[in-house]
Amino acid sequence: MRSALLGVVVVLSLGKTLGADDVTQAELKKLEGTWQLVSALKDGQKTPPETVKKIRVVIKGSKHSVYFGTDAVAREIPFTIDPTKDPKITTDTLPDGQVIRGIYKLEGDKLTSCVAEVGKERPTKFAAPPGSGHTLRIFKRVNP
């Protein structure tokens, strides 16, 4: 009886893990595509519109590239997400091993992201007041 219960617990645990992974994979699919920056606020300061319109992010699988105009300024940066958290979380791993922690929300073709400075604690809300070190960005999905 005891071993049967243990077997049920193991199966249920595996089911939860696989379910969470399925949720993550589905969310990654929703995030895939080209995202044009619409607005950005860093430490309470607005990013100038002429800069904003030059920035786009391309997400493919669990990697993203950042473009400034036609130049790739960051290529295939690996990231992880946890869409089961509230707010949803993301963690980028830079080529040198440092991490950028953030939160995000996806509403149709609008992606809102708030990130901390490299190596700092993850933001808990979508805000970038002066002195926070946070960057709040809003993107819209566009055709490549």
Image: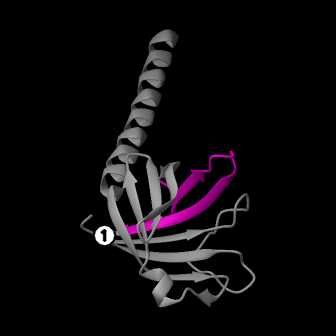
Residue 127 picture quarter: bottom right
Location of mark 1 (residue) = 141
Task: Kindly identify the amino acid type of the residue bearing the numbered disc 1.
Answer: Arg
Image x and y of residue 101, in percent: 62, 59
Viewer-nearest residue: 73 or 20: 73
Residue 44 picture quarter: bottom right
Is 74 contained in the magenta span? no
Viewer-nearest residue: 12 or 75: 75
Q: State left or right for residue 114 relative to residue 97.
A: left
Residue at image point 68% right, 45% down? 97
Name the outermost residue toward the left: 143
Residue at image point 39% right, 33% down? 18
Residue 4 picture quarter: top left
Over which residues does the magenta segment extend? 84-106
Image x and y of residue 21, in percent: 41, 39
Q: State left or right for residue 22 relative to residue 116.
A: left
Q: Is residue 83 visible?
A: no
Is 96 contained in the magenta span? yes
* Quadrant housing the C terminus: bottom left
Image x and y of residue 75, in percent: 49, 52
With respect to residue 42, does 3 lie above or below? above
Residue at image point 52% right, 12% down? 2
Viewer-nearest residue: 128 or 17: 128
